[in-house]
Amino acid sequence: MSVFLARRLASFVLTLLVASLVVFGALELLPGNAAQLMLGATATPEAVAALEHQLGLDRPAAARYLAWIGGLVAGHGGDSYFYGQPSFELIAERLEVTLPLALLAMALAALLALALGVFAAARHNRLGDVAVMALSQAGLAVPSFWLAILLILLFAVRLQWVGAGGFPGWREADGGGLLPGLAALALPVLSLAVVQAAILARVTRSAVLEALREDYVRTARAKGLGRRAVLWRHVLRNALLPVLTVAGLQFANLLTGTIVVENVFVLPGLGRLVFQAIANRDLPLVRDIVIVLAAAVIVLNLLVDLAAAWIDPRLRTVAR
């Protein structure tokens, strides 16, 4: 297990390094000048040059990349051009919205997918199976932002059960609280979870159907175990490996989906922050947000690998 973990950690570091190179290089190719944008179109070339020197934009790209990586290793990012604050402070503030949103959406998607996938597999080629597959196909065809708009029209405009957007905060002193915060995230979570659950439900159904054909299922039934006990105690655990793998990949799509959904619901999360940073060409803030999101996806995939190795110990032997 130690060799397996060491290899996964080395892969994590290498992937993060490659991601940092890609992020830095891509942002360097973006057109426009941050100093010119900050000073306006009427700024003189001398003023623009002075601000570029102050921001360090006149330094070679390699020097700026190494300075950025050194700051990340030391535990601090760059300073935002437009907010005048350390980028990690801004990211930490916005994570109070984005992180609960992403985790709640993923948890809801997983619960829905497991329940629907197992239900469909247990009723293979029957009415329940056909209904679940039809619903999942519809979920695949609906973009999360379009579903978000429909949910706003139904629950906020027509029924007026919740607000159409905004976030009151988690602290009662700021006029929010736990229940108001969860209520504000209910529609965004649902709009993100439905699409992910549709994909995961189909994967769960296929994995469970494949596991039901294994010899150990016949053996368990021959020993007198009921169909439900076999399904939940034996089949589901062996079917979880492909489900976990796909769920890890889905989390990346879910994080990118939050960028659009947060703008639809006017949520002060990372999605709106990165949107505003790109519009303002605030490169230090954009770089740090993207590398934090990349690190989150890589860490999640590392955890998925470890969970898969815990479920199926054979994977540790193969990894050696």
Image (cartoon, grey):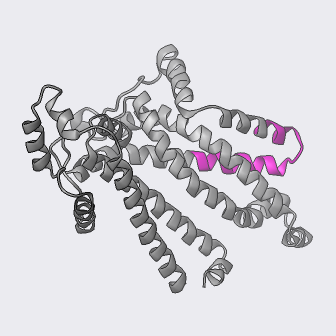
Any magenta on residue 130? yes
Q: Quadrant of residue 306?
A: bottom right
Report the magenta stretch's main SS.
Answer: helix
Residue drawn at x 29%, y 48% is 91
Q: Is residue 82 visible?
A: no
At horizontal 89% and vertical 67% (from top left) the residue drawn is 221
The residue furthest right is 222
In this rendered view, identify the residue nearer to me: 89 or 115.
89
Q: Is residue 122 magenta?
A: yes
Q: Position of residue 307 (x, y in %)?
A: 57, 69
Left or right: 153, with 67 as reference point: right
Residue 230 located left or right of residue 190? right
Q: Is residue 144 above or below residue 103?
A: above
Q: In which quadrant will I find the C terminus?
A: bottom right
Tell me which residue sits at (39%, 26%) in the image: 165
> Residue 79 location in percent, x, y?
18, 50
Task: Quadrant for the N terminus, please.
Answer: bottom right
**Depth check: 224 or 235 in front?**
235
* Left-right relation of 46 to 222: left
Magenta-highlighted residues: 109-132
Please provide percent x and percent y for residue 121. 81, 51
